[in-house]
Amino acid sequence: MPQLGETVAEGTIVKWLKGVGDTIGSGETLFEVETDKATMEIPSMTAGIVRAIHLSEGATASVGSVVAVIEGEGESIAPATPGNKVPEKAVSVTVSANAMPVVAAAESSASLGPIDPFRGVRSPERNFGSATLPSGAKITPLARRLAAQAGIDVGTLNGGGPAGRIVAADVREALATPSAPEQAASTALPGVAEERDDVLATYADADYEEVPLDGMRKTIARRLVLAKQTIPHFYLNTSVRFDQLLALRAQINQNTVSDVKISVNDLIVKAFGQALLAVPAANAVWAGDRILRLRQVDLGVAVSVEGGLFTPVVRGVDKISLSTLSNTIKDFAQRARGRRLSPSEYRGGSASVSNLGMFGTREFSAIINPPHSSILAVGAVERVPTEGPDDQVVFVSQMNVTLSCDHRVIDGALGAELLAAFRSAIERPLTLVV
């Protein structure tokens, strides 16, 4: 199982495109794998014959584990002998309850020759720290990454690997041993099993369909609970006049030179990008013990898909043209619905835009998508009466927006300044095309 992203530790096998005994070429797709949000095709790194498949479709494999064996041209998998066994870690995988490992009947795992599953895992020092701790202890790349993701201080770990090296098993052992605060929390709050049993008991006589959680829904649940528990949200709301922007959009789309049709959402994303450029202190993220102010405006755009949502990140919104922005968002939306986005395409950025106006939603408050520090919730455009010249009542197009802010990064005045900059960009839309 290859490294599928810097923070991806495992993947679920969706479909095998080759079976045992099939010939495969180098670069030809061997299987499809699903991570928390993306489905990717995994090519073979070598040409040969598929000799064994260790996992069935639906099974989950950790990065670096062996999921299949390919015998290259001129190679031969020698029978195992007492001194020539497959390392246990070669098939170290996590298998779901309804999926068992599959191996060719004529070639069981016991007949396989030596397999080296320990290929390097990309674990840059800038993301997960040095391989040598201040104490002089050594730590493997996988252990560094797992500890960073779990928020574990590697200095508290005891190395159980060769020569005292800290390995992934040491990190997992630390995760399995709850700290005192965690133990207190577990006694104060019901666990997942208790919550499930309580709900099932409540609806024991009800007629319902049980829907198992897929990787996307589990990720959404985990991240949004984390967001509401750890991010101090506050909300700012305003109404924006939309007449000039709608007129500008109509003029742009009447242009016969280009086939690109600009949507209202494209203009909103562009305007929010310009607002973040005008208020650079808000183009920032919380990093534990510091704030990172980003020099480029990268914006997440929420895309609804069956079973959940993606938030792909458009890079350099402040620099690209409206047509490029529109094409990028359309491409992201199309590939998101097919779950074909790569992990790098929905990571990063400082803020997001969530637009429910097309569903007639007047206004709503969105949950910040960590590590972002803000999200703009966009409601529907409505015709409303207002006071015009000479005390006359006139009807105008108006849109309600709500800005959710992380108070650790954005204070009330700064959030208000950002929202005012967005309103200015919408109500003076020529700035979006200049």
Image: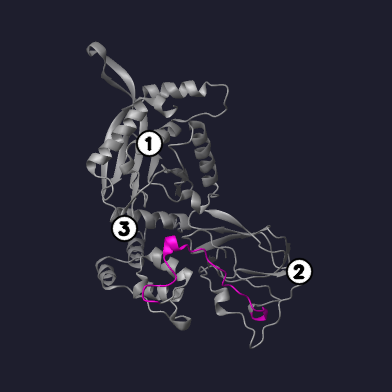
Amino acid type indicated by mark 1:
Phe
Residue farthest along the bottom direction in this orientation = 82
Query: Is 187 positioned to the left or the right of 383 in the image?
Result: left
Query: Is 368 positioned to the left or the right of 78 in the image?
Result: left
Say whether residue 111 is magenta.
yes
Q: Nearer the viewer, mark 1 or mark 3?
A: 3
Q: What residue does disc 3 label?
A: 288
Tell whether label 3 touches label 2 (CB within 8 Å): no
Question: Which residues, given as a range, are shown in magenta?
Answer: 110-136
Secondary structure, mark 2, is loop
Label 2, label 1: how far apart the Cα atoms are: 56 Å
The location of residue 92, given as percent across then percent down, is 54, 74
Amino acid type indicated by mark 2:
Glu
Q: Quadrant of the C terminus?
A: top left
The location of residue 289, given as percent across then percent down, is 29, 58
- Residue 173: which quarter of the image? bottom left
Applied colour scheme: one colour
Crowding at mark 1 (Cα within 10 Å: few <14, some 14-19, many 20+) = many
Q: What residue does disc 1 label?
A: 272
Q: What residue does disc 2 label?
A: 73
Tell whether label 3 touches label 1 (CB within 8 Å): no
The location of residue 39, given as percent across then percent down, is 55, 54
Say whether residue 187 is magenta.
no
Secondary structure, mark 3, is loop
Q: Nearer the viewer, mark 2 or mark 3?
A: 3
Secondary structure, mark 1, is helix
